[in-house]
Amino acid sequence: MLISRQSVITPLVVSLCILGIGFMQSPRLQKLLNSREYIPLDTLEKGLQQEKLRLNLLKQTPSFGYDNLVANWAYLNFLQYFGDDEVRERTGYSLSPEYFEVILKRDPKFLAAYLSLSSSTSIYAAMPERSIAIIEEGLKSLSPHVPEKSYYIWRYKGIDELLFLGNSQAAQKSFETAANWASEYKDEESQLVAFTSQKTAEFLSSNPDSKYAQIATWSMILSNPVDEQTRKRAISAIEKLGGAVITNPNGTNSIKLPPKD
């Protein structure tokens, strides 16, 4: 069987473009990483501007059917960016939504990416509006079973809407949808999500400004595999609302609610 020249050249060109975008700054980047403590802030900021331009280029560059490859590659780059605590302390997390616009435009079914998006953009970058907008765009390509357990994405959206925008009405609708999508699964995990999401939605409908709903939502964040900084923020928020987090011997958390007003 003969293979056309185009079928060989196109993937090669795409791969070279992706690798070229990634490695054209590698020697400079490695030099900066090796001497991080001596990097002036303006140099770091120039690097961020270059990275933003690179991400904008990725948003516009055709992938010729290699969307998943681009999405995975961008996600790996995000993990490196997000995990660089020393630099992030100096420059912040403003590029988080830029990474996820690339990732979820290419692969809106990338379930794990939505949790990272919600955490890094809403909590760290303080841009919940961007997080929600990106999630909403991704949801246009999803259904209850595509990807599997996609109901979690509606929960992430509801959490952002309630905790960071104070929009209890939008959060209620998101939790209702999460409950409906989760109810289509028969496993124990999905049934629990369906139950808790429905109860949260019902509570919000009658108590839109309740601190109990906010405590419950911060508890959802704690139930996810989050980093230590996010964990501390969730515990601090619960305590400010009058609750308390008790760590059980098995490593799980229990929430002690404040007395009713």
Image (spheres, rainbow, N blue to C red):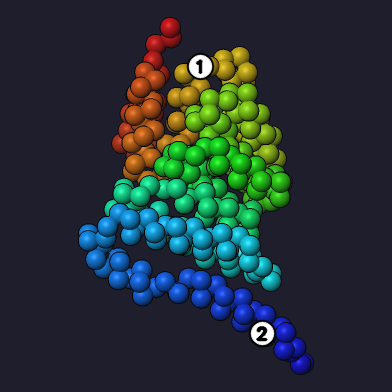
Nearer the viewer's eye, disc 2 or disc 1?
Answer: 2
User: Foreground residue, 152 or 120?
Assistant: 120
Camera-nearest residue between 163 and 198: 163
Which residue lies under the disc numbered 1?
210
120 or 258, nearer to the observer: 120
Q: Quadrant of residue 47?
A: bottom left
Horizontal and vertical percent for residue 155? 58, 36
- Helix or strand or loop: what does disc 1 sit on? loop
Quadrant placement of the C terminus:
top left
Residue 177 disc label: none
Whole-percent x, y for residue 93 in the image:
41, 48
Instruction: Locate residue 104: give its quadrant.
Output: bottom right
- Marker count (numbered): 2
Question: At x 58% / y 53%, what residue is drawn?
Answer: 101
Please say if 217 is above or below 2.
Answer: above
In this view, the residue farthest toward the left is 38
Res 126 visible: yes
Callouts 2 and 1 close, C-beta under 8 Å = no
The percent coordinates of residue 89 (x first, y second) are: 31, 48
Q: Which residue does the image show at 49% across and 31% down from the upper left?
A: 164
Most foreground residue, 148 or 2: 2
**Amino acid on which disc 2 is placed:** Ile
**89 lies left or right of 52:** left
SS at badge 2: helix
Q: Earlier in the sequence, mark 2 or mark 1?
A: 2
Q: Circle 2 sits on which residue? A: 9
Please name the residue shown 52% across and 49% down the image.
97
Residue count near mark 2 (Cα–Cα under 10 Å), binned few <14, some 14–19, many ≥20: few
Looking at the rendered image, the quarter that the N terminus falls into is bottom right
The image shows residue 218, relative to residue 14, as above or below, that is above
